[in-house]
Image: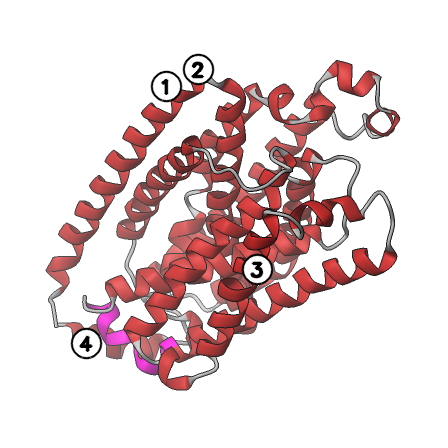
């Protein structure tokens, strides 16, 4: 068992690597954007939609924990709070999008609006001004949720006041409603409006479950990485990994249910304005990506996570989590990119640079936040005995 002194250097080293990798990728990405501005914003949107899901999904899972309780949440509270505190970083990284509306959204192109009755009818909602106002509102609400969830948790560390648990629980109920509404409208604004003639009432929920699933996978990767350091190594048990594996399995099944429900309802409805969205994504060259998602975003993880031995094994569960992280990106690619490339998947090198660049900066910010607070809650009334035991074994 490694001592706690190894954690600081390990986090610092990983943070430096992530930051350098992200910064270099973004510099190369910007240079590429000078030559091809349209591809710049398309690639940036893809990378951003993926990475914004991790802090948002983490905040949602954190609020679920405060509402439901349970020992599974004890070891993940701090990593979830650290992810939530990166919302301001993601707000800054969103700023370039304000300069690219006309290059990626038809509703921001006056000529397209003038010739399209549908865009004219939706112009009260789909306009650059309202887009910006709503984006500012989303980030303000997300920041508010993450700020108070971390603030009251830190105060609980300092005072042990049991009333703070009630405050966290009281915020989490309305907070999940706020999360659901903002992510739904965010997905409509930032992704669905790429194809403004199409709509789906399940679309926002799909983004929510993709965010929760990717966040859970990222969290498991972090816990596996920290599992041989104190105090986390003493608090993380096979049973805790088993619980997190069960929660991941739940999100996998929910993703499959929502994805199939949307497909079934649209296909059975046989409406001309809705079916083209799927005829592009489920036929031709895009069908291969759809099949790939069915196999590796559902079938394989579902089968493996049914096995108790797999969920209790650090290496196996970590491998599944990495697969789900990759498939989360593939899923966002499948949802977004056909709006630009209807004939089939044609990944651009700028897609990779944007994803690595934004991801590197976000991971560096996340590790900074992770190191800033104790890795385990110190005075949580529900788990104080567990915490004392874990910290005691760590010395």
| In this view, 395 is above or below 150 | below
Q: Is mark 2 on a helix, strand or loop?
A: helix
Q: How crowded is mark 1: few (under 14 residues within 10 Å), some or many (20 or more)?
A: few
Residue that numbered label 1 is attached to: 31
Which secondary structure class fits the magenta region best? helix
Q: Is mark 3 on a helix, strand or loop?
A: helix
283 and 74: which is toward the camera = 283
Determine contact: label 2, label 3, CB under 8 Å. Answer: no
Q: Which of marks 1 and 4 is nearer the N terminus?
A: 1
284 and 112: which is toward the camera = 284
The answer to whether residue 155 of the structure is visible from this angle is no
Q: Which of marks 2 and 4 is nearer the N terminus?
A: 2
Q: Where is residue 331 in the image (x, y as percent from the top left)?
A: 54, 52
- CA separation, marks 2 and 3? 34 Å
* Residue segment shown in magenta: 230-241
Residue drawn 41% across the image and 85% down it: 308
Task: Kindly report which numbered mark, 1 or 4, lies closer to the viewer in this rendering.
Answer: 1
Q: Residues within 10 Å of mark 2 (few under 14, many from 20)?
A: few
């Amino acid at each position: 068992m490694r001592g706690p002194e190894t954690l600081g250097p390990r986090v610092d080293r990983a943070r430096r690597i992530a930051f350098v990798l992200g910064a270099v990728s973004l510099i190369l990405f910007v240079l590429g954007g000078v030559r091809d501005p349209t591809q710049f914003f398309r690639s940036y949107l893809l990378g951003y939609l993926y990475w914004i899901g991790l802090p948002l999904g983490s905040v949602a899972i954190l609020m679920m924990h405060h509402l439901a309780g349970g020992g599974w949440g004890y070891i993940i509270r701090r990593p979830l709070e650290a992810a939530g505190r990166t919302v301001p970083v993601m707000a800054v990284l969103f700023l370039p999008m304000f300069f690219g509306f006309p290059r990626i959204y038809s509703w921001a192109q006056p000529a397209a609006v003038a010739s399209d009755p549908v865009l004219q009818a939706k112009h009260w909602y789909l306009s650059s001004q309202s887009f910006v106002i709503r984006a500012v509102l989303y980030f303000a609400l997300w920041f508010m949720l993450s700020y108070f969830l971390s603030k009251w948790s830190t105060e609980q560390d300092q005072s042990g006041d049991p009333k703070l648990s009630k405050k966290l629980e009281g915020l989490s109920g309305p907070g999940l409603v706020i999360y659901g509404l903002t992510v739904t409208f965010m997905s409509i604004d930032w992704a669905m409006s790429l194809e403004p003639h199409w709509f789906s009432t399940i679309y926002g929920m799909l983004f929510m479950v993709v965010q929760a699933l990717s966040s859970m996978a990222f969290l498991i990767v972090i816990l596996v990485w920290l599992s041989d350091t104190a105090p986390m190594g003493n608090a993380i048990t096979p049973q805790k990994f088993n619980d997190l594996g069960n929660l991941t399995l739940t999100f996998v099944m929910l993703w499959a249910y929502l994805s199939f429900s949307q497909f079934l309802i649209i296909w059975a409805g046989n409406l001309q304005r809705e079916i083209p969205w799927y005829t592009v994504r489920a036929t031709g060259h895009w069908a291969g990506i759809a099949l790939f998602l069915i196999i590796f975003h559902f079938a394989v993880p579902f089968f493996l996570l049914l096995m108790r031995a797999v969920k209790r094994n650090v290496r196996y569960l970590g491998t599944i989590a990495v697969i789900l992280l990759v498939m989360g990106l593939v899923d966002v690619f499948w949802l977004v990119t056909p709006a630009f490339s209807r004939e089939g998947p044609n990944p651009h090198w700028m897609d990779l640079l944007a994803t690595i660049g934004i991801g590197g900066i976000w991971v560096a910010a996340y590790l900074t936040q992770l190191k800033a607070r104790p890795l385990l809650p110190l005075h949580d009334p529900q788990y104080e005995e567990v915490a004392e035991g874990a910290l005691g074994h760590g010395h």
